[in-house]
Amino acid sequence: MKFGEFHLHVVSDGKFRLDGGAMFGVVPRVLWERTNPPDAANRILLGLNCLLIKSSREVILVDTGIGTLYDEKFAGMFQIDHSENLHDGLKSLGLTSADVTRVILTHLHFDHCGGNCVRGDDGTLNPAFPNATYYVQKGELEYAKAPDPRSKGSYLAHNWEPVEASGQLQLISGDTEIVPGVQTVVTGGHTRDHQIVKIQSDGKIACFLADLVPTNSHLRTPYVMGYDLYPKTTMEVKEKVLKQAVQGKWLVFFEHAPSVKAGYLFEKDGRIQLEKVEP
């Protein structure tokens, strides 16, 4: 999709399942199951949608999906479906992992940075994007290294340690312009230092919402994940960002929606609704 000076592409790293109750927090199942039918284990289908931002000089990847560094038990627990994957997606665009110049990580949960690294023939872990600088909030890395018991299972050190060891990990603090027209914006909420990504060109704005609004089923303010460490912050920031998106006619991207990956927001009868597009 052409977007000003950029080309924007959703690149899928497959699908997986998480507990529906955890994905919708205090929202009763009778409401969310209408559009997100759970399986026998109460898990709902979710996408692993990464965003590729391409310009004449840059190939920027936002998040890296769930990757391949997991065992059979992990794959079964989350019902990982890798029939689509990040590297095949890049190939379909005429790119390889070596072409990626920058990787922006919204946060360090395993389903957002699991594709950071790959295992070599000798068994060692190496950055999957050898020529890229990886960006993450300094506070997010600090927390990932010493999480509380509630969050410990979401942070897997093998997803960032090889990148840090290679010298490719750049820590940022607060809202940061990565390149002209591409900016990270700290939202907090899901984690203390969770960030979204804004793309601006030719007077237009696009926004990768990450886990601030993980799917198009989370547009209503109270629809907040049980995983969020600071749910009140999520609600406050989400309300603000979505209002800006409506007023500014932003193109928004949903990282975990299994089918509706992008669209434009509008308000009707006092509720924010979505006009979907195919990115």
Image (spheres, rainbow, N blue to C red):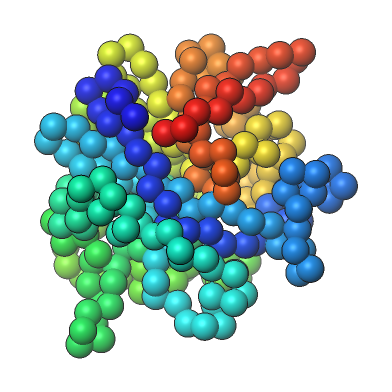
Residue 149, position in %: x, y?
A: 60, 71
Q: How many marks?
A: 0
Image side of residue 100 versus residue 182, left or right: left
Q: Is residue 106 above or below residue 98?
A: above
Q: Is residue 94 above or below residue 119?
A: above
Residue drawn at point x = 33 percent, y = 34 percent: 8
Residue drawn at point x = 15 percent, y = 57 percent: 98
Residue 42, position in %: x, y?
A: 77, 63
Image side of residue 174 versus residue 4, left or right: right
Residue 66, position in %: x, y?
A: 44, 63
Residue drawn at point x = 87 percent, y = 47 percent: 30
Quarter location, residue 234: top right
Toward the viewer: 203 or 44? 44
Image side of residue 48 versus residue 34, left or right: left
Image quadrant in which the N terminus is located:
top left
Residue 182, position in %: x, y?
A: 29, 31
Residue drawn at point x = 46 percent, y = 48 percent: 49
Toward the viewer: 164 or 99? 99
Image side of residue 232 versus residue 209, left or right: right
* Residue 135 shows in the view: no
* Residue 264 shows in the view: yes
